[in-house]
Image: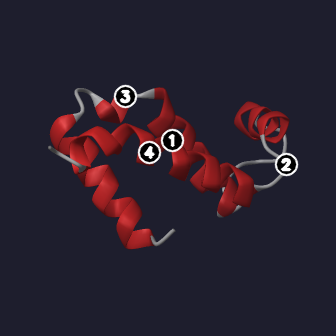
Amino acid sequence: MKYTDLLWMLDVLYRFYPRYHTHDLILLAEDIWKWVNNELPEDSAALVYLKTLFTSPTEAIQWVWDEIELLTGAYRFHN
């Protein structure tokens, strides 16, 4: 996974996926990004929720990456 690939896929979603910015996946990805950067307080509900879903920030990022690839797949590979 490369950061530039992630940006490219988010751009594809922005162009073709209706209301992608309000999609639950994007909101979850924002919380994960805050978790990675230690921007979430220890007692925040978002951090508690993320820790129940994932064992580490790395696992969370990989999961989001896989989900974004699935969403963008239909737009990336036209027949």
Q: Position of residue 46 (x, y in %)?
A: 70, 35
SS for dot 4: helix
| Label placed on residue 58 | none
- Which residue bears the numbered disc 3? 22
Q: State which tag comes first along the sequence, 1 or 2.
A: 2
Q: Quadrant of residue 13?
A: top left
Q: Mark 2 points at which residue?
A: 55
Classify mark 3: residues with Cα within 10 Å, few (<14), some (14-19) or many (20+).
few
Mark-to-mark CA distance, 1 and 3: 15 Å
Q: In which quarter of the image is the C terminus?
A: top left
- The residue positioned 73% from the left and 54% from the top of the image is 59
Q: Where is residue 12 in the image (x, y as percent from the top left)?
A: 23, 49
Give the vertical position of 6 relative to 22 (above or below): below
Asked if disc 4 and disc 1 are in contact, CB closer than 8 Å, the reply is yes
Q: Observer-nearest residue: 69 or 18? A: 69
> Cβ–Cβ below 8 Å for labels 2 and 3?
no
Three-letter code for the amino acid on which mark 1 is drawn: Glu
- In the image, is 56 to the left or to the right of 73? right
- Report the mark closest to the observer, 1 or 2: 1
Mark 4 vs 3, N-terminal side: 3
Could you tell whether 63 is left or right of 67 in the image? Answer: right
Q: What residue type is labelled 3?
A: Thr
**Is residue 1 placed above or below 29 in the rendered structure?**
below
Amino acid type shown at disc 2? Thr
Q: Say which residue label 4 marks.
A: 68
Q: Mark 1 points at which residue?
A: 67
Looking at the image, is mark 4 or mark 2 earlier in the sequence?
Answer: 2
Mark pair 2, 3: CA separation: 25 Å
Q: Are marks 4 and 2 in contact (CB under 8 Å)?
A: no
Q: What element carries label 3?
A: helix
